[in-house]
Image (cartoon, grey):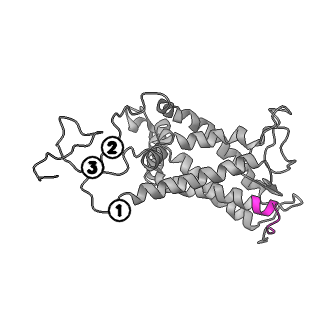
């Protein structure tokens, strides 16, 4: 039976001998758990959808649109296309969905992204779940051990993500053709692709690795005025990196969904002109 004289229970995790012995894990009274819960729900929804579409291996082409999940097509078992790159690098031995050959690069870029790290660390691992809320884990090794040390290859995934964004730009240009591959067409899908590629480039360029490549390790900005100007522009985008990450995640899923609905016959692509 409690007498009111027992010492407060000190939780493990970030609480150590050198820290104040505060019993509660936090003193916040707001709904601090709502943000990580919504983050986890959003990321989980995209994971489920993208996994389904990646393994579906169907309804990813509706002339002149090709799903961003399947472009460029690198296997011989790709659906015949005249829109977007179709390089049969892997030949006929690849029997799985061709999306699995290309999605590893943009997904690897996002998984190792600095913002997404914070998002899924908080949303799934509660590390920590919110500001001023104690870490529930007994130990914290950061990204110094496997598998989290693999996060350090983010800059290399950036080099792979740039060509993928370039190919999706090419796909967007080809979206100005009609189903007979004649130029001068603009459908609702064309607008979807335009919005998507703008957001993809904005997210890619606003990446911390891009900012470092442009202006990192410069001792004197005055000696590199062009790089300094570019660094400033990227820095402004970088301030919106979180918003661009979510917007581009939604737009690429929407572009794939649109192609799927048109290819499966759910509706015809409305022609604007």
Identify the mark nearer the N-term, 1 or 2: 1
For residue 130, side relative to residue 21 (left or right): right
Nearer-the-camera pick, 76 or 209: 76
Q: Does the magenta stretch include residue 157?
A: no
Q: Quadrant of residue 263?
A: bottom right
Which residue, as the protein is rendered here, is positioned at the far top? Answer: 145
Q: In which quarter of the image is the C terminus?
A: bottom right
Residue at the left extreme?
Answer: 5
Compared to 260, does 98 lie above or below?
A: above
Q: Inspect this view and state whether residue 214 appears.
A: yes
Answer whether labels 2 and 3 touch (C-beta < 8 Å). Answer: no
Residue 243 is situated, as x and y percent measured from the top left of the image, at 49, 57
Q: x and y percent of residue 45 in the render?
A: 58, 55
Q: Which residue lies under the disc numbered 2?
A: 135
Judging depth in this view, the residue of 216 and 54 nearest the camera is: 54
Does dot 2 land on a helix, a strand or a loop?
loop
| Front residue (pair 185, 58) | 58
Q: Residue at x 83, y 60 (%)?
A: 183
Whether residue 69 appears in this view of the structure is no
Instruction: Rate crowding at label 2 as few (under 14), some (14 to 19) or many (20 or more) other CA atoms within 10 Å.
Output: many
For this view, does 249 lie left or right of residue 17? Answer: right
Task: For mark 3, give the secondary structure.
Answer: loop
Crowd rating for badge 3 (residues with CA inside 10 Å; few <14, some 14–19, many 20+): some
Label disc, if present, on residue 31 of the rendered structure:
1
| Magenta span contains residue 262 | yes
Q: In which quarter of the image is residue 65?
A: bottom right
Separation of disc 2 and disc 3 at Cα? 8 Å
Q: First in sequence, mark 2 or 3: give its number.
A: 3
| Magenta residue span | 260-268
Do the residues under discs 1 and 3 have CB atoms within 8 angstroms? no
């Amino acid at each position: 039976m409690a007498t009111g004289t027992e010492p407060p229970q000190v939780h493990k995790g970030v609480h150590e001998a050198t820290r104040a012995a505060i019993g509660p894990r936090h003193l916040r009274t707001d709904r601090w758990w709502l943000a990580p819960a919504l983050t986890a729900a959003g990321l989980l929804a995209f994971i489920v959808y993208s996994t389904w579409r990646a393994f579906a291996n169907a309804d990813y082409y509706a002339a002149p649109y090709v799903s961003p999940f399947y472009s460029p097509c690198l296997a011989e078992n790709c659906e015949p296309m005249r829109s977007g790159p179709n390089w049969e690098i892997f030949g006929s031995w690849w029997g799985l969905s061709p999306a699995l050959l290309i999605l590893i690069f943009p997904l690897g870029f996002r998984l190792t992204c600095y913002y997404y790290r914070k998002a899924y660390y908080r949303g799934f691992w509660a590390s920590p779940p919110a500001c001023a809320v104690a870490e529930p884990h007994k130990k914290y090794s950061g990204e110094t051990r496997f598998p989290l040390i693999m996060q350090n290859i983010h800059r290399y995934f950036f080099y792979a993500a740039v060509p993928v964004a370039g190919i999706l730009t090419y796909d967007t240009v080809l979206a100005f053709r009609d189903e007979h591959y004649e130029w001068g067409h603009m459908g609702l899908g064309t607008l979807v692709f335009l919005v998507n590629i703008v957001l993809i480039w904005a997210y890619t360029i606003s990446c911390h690795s891009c900012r470092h490549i442009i202006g990192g390790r410069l001792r004197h900005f005055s000696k590199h005025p062009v790089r300094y100007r570019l660094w400033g522009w990227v820095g402004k985008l970088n301030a919106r990196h979180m918003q661009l990450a979510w917007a581009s995640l939604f737009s690429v899923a929407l572009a794939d969904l649109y192609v799927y609905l048109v290819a499966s016959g759910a509706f015809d692509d409305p022609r604007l002109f």
